[in-house]
Amino acid sequence: MSAHAQTKATWIWYPGDYEIWLSNKMQNRRTDRGSFLPPLWKLDSHYVLVDFHKDFELAAPEEALIAIEGQYNVRIDGKAVSGYPKSVTLPSGKHRINIKIYNQGNVPALFVKSAHVVSDSSWQATFEDKEWIDASGKTSDLSATVYVPAGSWNFNESTVLPSAFHLPTEPMKAVSKEKKAHSIMVDFGKETFGYVKLHDVKGKGHITLYYGESPEEARATETCELLDRIEVSNQQNADITLEGSRAFRYVNIQYDDNVSVDDVSMLYEYSPVEQRGSFRCSDDQINKIWDIAAYTLHLNTREFFIDGIKRDRWVWSGDAAQSYLMNYYLYFDSPTVKRTITALRGKDPVTSHTNTIMDYTFYWFISIYDYYQHTGDKAFIRQTYPRMQTMMNYCLGRRDKDGLMEGLPGDWVFIDWADGLSKKGEVSFEQLLFCRSLESMALCANLMHDGKNAAMYNTLAKSLKAKLFSYYWNPQKHAFVHSRINGKPTANVTRYANMFAIFFNYLTDAQKQGVKKYVLLNDNIQKITTPYMQFYELEALCAMNEQSYVLQRMKDYWGGMLNLGATTFWEEYNPAVKGTDIYAMYGRPFGKSLCHAWGASPIYLLGKYYLGVKPTAPGYQQYTIEPQLGGLQWMEGIVPTPNGNIKVHCSGRQIQVSADSGTGTLRFKSKTQPVCNEATIKSAANGFYELTIQKGKSYTVNYTAA
Amino acid sequence: MSAHAQTKATWIWYPGDYEIWLSNKMQNRRTDRGSFLPPLWKLDSHYVLVDFHKDFELAAPEEALIAIEGQYNVRIDGKAVSGYPKSVTLPSGKHRINIKIYNQGNVPALFVKSAHVVSDSSWQATFEDKEWIDASGKTSDLSATVYVPAGSWNFNESTVLPSAFHLPTEPMKAVSKEKKAHSIMVDFGKETFGYVKLHDVKGKGHITLYYGESPEEARATETCELLDRIEVSNQQNADITLEGSRAFRYVNIQYDDNVSVDDVSMLYEYSPVEQRGSFRCSDDQINKIWDIAAYTLHLNTREFFIDGIKRDRWVWSGDAAQSYLMNYYLYFDSPTVKRTITALRGKDPVTSHTNTIMDYTFYWFISIYDYYQHTGDKAFIRQTYPRMQTMMNYCLGRRDKDGLMEGLPGDWVFIDWADGLSKKGEVSFEQLLFCRSLESMALCANLMHDGKNAAMYNTLAKSLKAKLFSYYWNPQKHAFVHSRINGKPTANVTRYANMFAIFFNYLTDAQKQGVKKYVLLNDNIQKITTPYMQFYELEALCAMNEQSYVLQRMKDYWGGMLNLGATTFWEEYNPAVKGTDIYAMYGRPFGKSLCHAWGASPIYLLGKYYLGVKPTAPGYQQYTIEPQLGGLQWMEGIVPTPNGNIKVHCSGRQIQVSADSGTGTLRFKSKTQPVCNEATIKSAANGFYELTIQKGKSYTVNYTAA
């Protein structure tokens, strides 16, 4: 009998191909004032010709349903079935079924279902046969064909074609409407995303929709970022749903004399990911921040994790890396992470950095081992490791004579949006990320039992780390300097390398304290004005137990956006900027995105550093819970894991925890001797108490917060 | 004014992309007894997102028509035009127009036409922008974007879409028809290709078409290679044209009781290449051979040069390399050569040899410099050279410790269809082709002014040539031995390396004579039974002035096929095989292709070695004409060149030549003092006379054939 008799049939394809195809589709939806605005980097494609096979053993013959996307053949033990069969009889005994599919426009995909044989990841796929025949028809003995397990998602019905995928929508009404002679201005009450629907449109002429994340933008017909123009010619009243999805809170609809529009609503489009994580605490502003952050992340969690819903609607590696981390505390939706990582990498040959950005390449490497640490999903590492190697080869080929990465022509050294930030020479931040990338490669190589390359990557990482300290560490400044130019360290200190070095754990405790005092808490060092880098700055501070300080920073910064009426968090926020200038960026009055994934970092910070939950072995087989109230009176929340949830409630007097799987360690400090009836409490180093959390049990600890 | 004001507008795309896309389409048309049978190797795809631009200068504004295949934007000086414009106003002065196109299923392509600005190869294309902005919107100063001249073919109308391309067809009638109760057997008189049309079909039921290149095959309903089954349900009489194109001379149509078919015809599908070359001589059998060869090549000259029209209908590099050479003497159709070379290479990364065959990789390299020698088309070398380099890197990476190419797992060492031919170890033939490939790389590198790599390839070629002689040359046998196994030369001598070494000019005159006597004219050396390798064997003999012997071989071998009723030349022909066994191959009774491109080599041999015309400088700027009657009383013919034709008439008493371009040298031997009124005849080495042929003039030489 087939070993997979119990699994569900699902549409399968060459692993990674559907993700690349779908990301092409998604990333080519951006418009800029009515003009198509596609990505600037290379887009790859699926393999157009793929052979799939499965070895099976049956006690009795059975009929298999076959559904295919593409032109195909079906072979049983190498013998072709005539034509394009919709079903095939699988014979009893041991046999192999092959299905080979050609599809230029969509991804070659198949669905097979009989009583015991179903299409799933136990099928093998290849894009290249390496077998041949001699003049007598005899096949070569020696095959070098590389087979990989087929990829799939959740297309579990033969009639639900992967190529027809679209996110679900639901109707939403505006909360207010201002109607004039030839215009309607509607407000949907908060930032949203989808397709505007015009009701009872009549007449002949033009209708123009000006979208706004702010009312100012919707009214700025000459400078708003998004608009749509349509032409109507309706004898009778009819509803019109716009073809393109857009981000907006406000829509300013203007139409010709001979046209009338009665009402405006929308189809809200969203990803049906389940919000499994939660957070509540004694501070209502923090609760509001968490809710708005969750909504912000949800809007930016689509087919993939994108940067922002107004623009660019693209998959940017640095942005996505943060979304993965937030996701682990909000949805724990692994498919969206895998899709995004796969789409970002595309295919060989590597012709540029990820999104053309050097740092974004490094985040990509780091995020993969990170994904493994959270999920324990080794199959994904196996699928991705070959493309990690070719990507790393690209990086290694671009090192300078000192073994460092400098921006060569075509390399965007991004780091952050910050005025006057130097990208010249060998930037310390890039070397730090490069070093962490090499460490991630070594970890993945070990997982793949590729000891030789693991050793190579480890050696490279060690050597680079030594250079980091010898080239960039300035003991007088208690910090890494920003860069080397012409082989000489500059005097400039920025926050980036220094804050990452803390949570990468590259520094001694004394060095960490120095960085905290002389860099992170030093107002003379250029401040960060994007939520993007605040994510890491606040993480570094949390990693040094500055939860109380960080809580206030969150209230000031994210609270500052709320005070300005934000219904989602922004791409950039500088409290010093006033008036409508707050909407400007890139030299455009409404260039700034008001709903940017990287604005949602409180989800991550509150889950990881306040509830204090994080995995310490792959897939949360082991984890720690180290609650830190940071000045809150109480907090509670749920952290999702691959198999169930971890629940935490914490006040100054009591901690309650429970978990569905894995083995955890609850760590806390207490001024009094803590009490727990469900487990033994042990004293640990640095004044901590610890107890072990077994799955399926609830624990209550009475203590006195230190 | 634009420098290209006078050129014609044509559809353009990223160079090579249309060729790859079209070859996918063509190569996925093969069926095997009604089942789809796609190629076994990897198929690549076009870039799905491409940016095109053109810098222009206009005295006055003008309106440009815009036609696009895909989703696109139009930018003038970086500023986007709204929506998807069908025309755009080009402003006066110096400006840049950009058009960026996304198309997943078809090739992104564009057509622009105004009075002075038209889409053509002066436009630049890229699949990857390497530019970016800072937070103020300022673009990076340093661009690393690689632009290449756009590709095109002959789509010169805005309404004729490249994606809709198909070869022309014309109706053809059968020459005989045998009608029975539920069947019709038709004979089209000769091998042909196209779509069968059933006339006045009525009723409800199944119709099956069994195709045959021979009547035996059409009647062998259980073993014929090609068949189609259709289901009809016609109330009234209707004509049905089959969807799939097939190769056949005979069609055996069988239908159900309730179905009637009145008549059968076909739509003959063909490539509209112009037959510019010709050959006529005093021997009618040779004339017939030339005509049938020309028809054979024409049937196999389609969107690309394919191997055979029954099967595989694929682009095989070794087969195509011969078609290119024949083409230079029949059509001189460069686009078909370029398309085929480009399709064969596909895209990076290189994951296997061309068509998985080691020798086919080498033919690919060699054919490119050869193309340049015939056409002088440096632009194509420029387009192809980067992919030649990555292909050669693949080869260099697969050398063994002695620097030789041995078949590794996944490498098909093909050489020829020949019983018991050893592919083990390091085969001398492969090293010979590898050496010639390195020489071709060096020549192309020099053309590209890539002196460093030219030197590298030359050094590698030199070293390999030295090894060829030290490892394989056996002075006792006057030949290269077939292979080395475990570092030791075998005693086996085959024809392959030895005959190629002659026309590669790797041998001394004495060695050549030895090879002729002890290998080529030695019946104890395994004989060649494919026209494929006869091509090269006869070329080697012609290169040693054995035209008389070769003429008889042609008459025996190709004449032998004619005697068996061939209307096109075959994939393989062994005069020793009798009866219906002549149709068998690959263990299948009708496996053999009776219309195979490589069967058409007399075209090449008669043009190059009897009329004696060949280029001696790129693009026929210089050429020689060295007529050799080889026992014929007279011969005449036309050899096409890039700019016009070369005409030759030759008898034992008189030679007449003329040429439209270039400077030629007419060489011949004469027993008497030759006379020419139009030019001075000089004596040359080895008893030759020579005179210089200027373009546009006719020359008559009276002489006495030696």
Image (spheres, coloured by chain):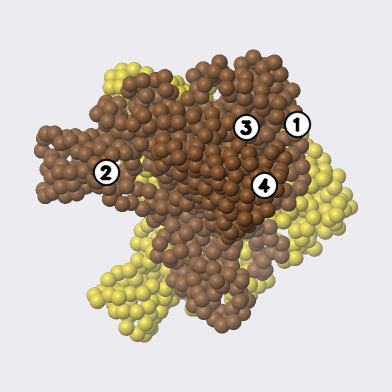
Chain colours: A yellow, B brown
Query: Which residue is label 4 attached to?
Result: B690
Residue beneath the point at 62% across and 25% down: B516
Query: Which residue is label 2 attached to?
Result: B196
Disc 2 residue type? Val
Instruction: Please say if A333 is above or below B151.
Output: above
Can residue B250 be seen by looking at this rendering?
Answer: yes
Residue A1 x %, y % = 36, 20
Mark 4 or mark 3, which is nearer to you?
4
- How far is the residue under mark 3 from the one under mark 2? 47 Å
Single out the residue that lies furthest toward the front.
B672
Mark 4 or mark 2, which is nearer to you?
4
In the rendered structure, are the residues bearing label 1 and label 2 in contact, judged by CB atoms less than 8 Å apart? no
- How far is the residue under mark 1 from the one under mark 3? 27 Å
Query: Which residue is label 1 attached to?
Result: B463
Which comes sooner in the sequence, label 4 or label 3?
3
Disc 4 residue type? Glu
Residue beneath the point at 28% across and 27% down: B216
- How far is the residue under mark 1 from the one under mark 2? 56 Å
Chain of the residue on which disc 4 is drawn: B
Disc 2, SS: strand
Badge 2 local density, few (<14 within 10 Å), some, or many (20+)?
Answer: many
Mark 1 or mark 3, which is nearer to you?
3
Residue A433 x %, y % = 71, 46
Single out the residue that lies furthest toward the right.
A476
Which comes sooner in the sequence, label 3 or label 2?
2
In the rendered structure, are the residues bearing label 1 and label 3 in contact, judged by CB atoms less than 8 Å apart? no
Identify which residue, B530 or A507, lies in the foreground: B530
Chain of the residue on which disc 3 is drawn: B
Query: Which residue is label 3 attached to?
Result: B544
